[in-house]
Amino acid sequence: MNLRALFAGLCLLLAALPLMAAQSDQRPEQMIRGSIDDLMKRIEGREAYFADHLGELEAIVDDSLEDVTDFRYIGASVMGRYFGNATPQQRSRFVETFRKTLIDTYTKGLVTFDYREIRVLDNQQASRYEDQASVDMEVVANDGTVYPVSYSLRLDDGRWKVVNVIVNGINLGLTFRNQFDQAMRDHNRDYDAVIDGWSPELAVEELEQGGNA
């Protein structure tokens, strides 16, 4: 399986998660399970169509992510120690840039998302905090390889929102934070240059080998 495509699919599974906003009385794993089933029905057998209509798919993803992903929280986390010294305008611009590049990059990968099964695990670990949750699942590739995936969520104004994804033991939020840190070093802490040139990259080989969250 192409791991870049795997993460594309996992990110875009969020496009089916409006249920999370509407059904906050459900447990996060119940909502994600139902949402994944819903999205699979929407895209199954239509990969060729979406390959020729990427703009349509991007619009679907962009609209859907609004209510279920806390991009401002994620953006602040990715900026890490540099967040405090950034201007409000730079913070907002990075959040929007991060959002757009993620959608653009991984929408293209959805059409090559090759899998046998996606399953949300029945036995979920209880969270120590009422406003935080994680949902563990597995993606089974056509060759039988099983990739563990964990969504991190936080409760914001009565709604569960996704704030991070861990794929095969690799913390993607931390990966992007390290990339931002390196870009700031390379550009002598020029925020505008880093934001203008931001392009998230996945170390596919690292994802394949796995690691520690």
Image (tube, helix red, strand yellow):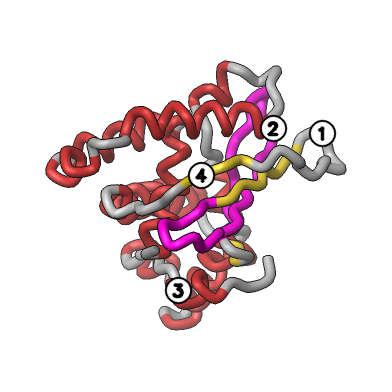
Task: Find disc 4 in the rendering and name its residue.
Answer: 118
The answer to whether mark 4 and mark 2 are in CB contact below 8 A is no
Q: Would you call the spot at circle 3 few (<14 residues within 10 Å), some (14-19), or many (20 or more)?
A: few
Q: In the picture, which quadrant includes the C terminus?
A: bottom right
What numbered label is drawn on residue 203? Answer: 3
Write the start and end of the magenta stretch as one range.
139-167
Residue 182 spot, x, y in % from top left? 50, 78
Question: Could you tell me the amino acid type at mark 1?
Answer: Glu
CA separation, marks 2 and 1?
8 Å
Please state which amino acid type lies under the numbered disc 3. Ala
**Label 2–label 1 contact, CB within 8 A:** yes
Asked if 169 appears above or below 115 in the picture, the reply is: below
Residue 93 x, y percent position in the rendering: 40, 50
For the residue labelled by badge 1, is the local secondary structure a helix, a strand or a loop?
A: loop
**In the rendering, at what x and y percent does residue 72 appear?**
54, 44
Label 2 sits on residue: 155
Could you say whether the residue bearing mark 2 is in a helix, strand or loop?
Answer: strand
Say which label, 2 or 1, has the lower sequence index. Answer: 1
**Dot 4 crowding, Cα within 10 Å, few <14, some 14–19, many 20+:** some
Which badge, 3 or 2, comes first in the chain's sequence?
Answer: 2
Quadrant, the N terminus = bottom left
First reached walking from the N terminus: tag 1 or tag 4: 4
What is the quadrant of residue 26 in the picture?
top right
Drawn side of residue 77 relative to residue 128, left or right: left
Mark 3 and mark 2: Cα distance apart in space: 30 Å
The Cα atoms of the two marked residues, 4 and 2, are separated by 24 Å
Separation of marks 1 and 3 at Cα, in angstroms? 33 Å
**Relative to 92, residue 105 above or below:** below
Is residue 208 located in the magenta-colored stretch of the structure?
A: no
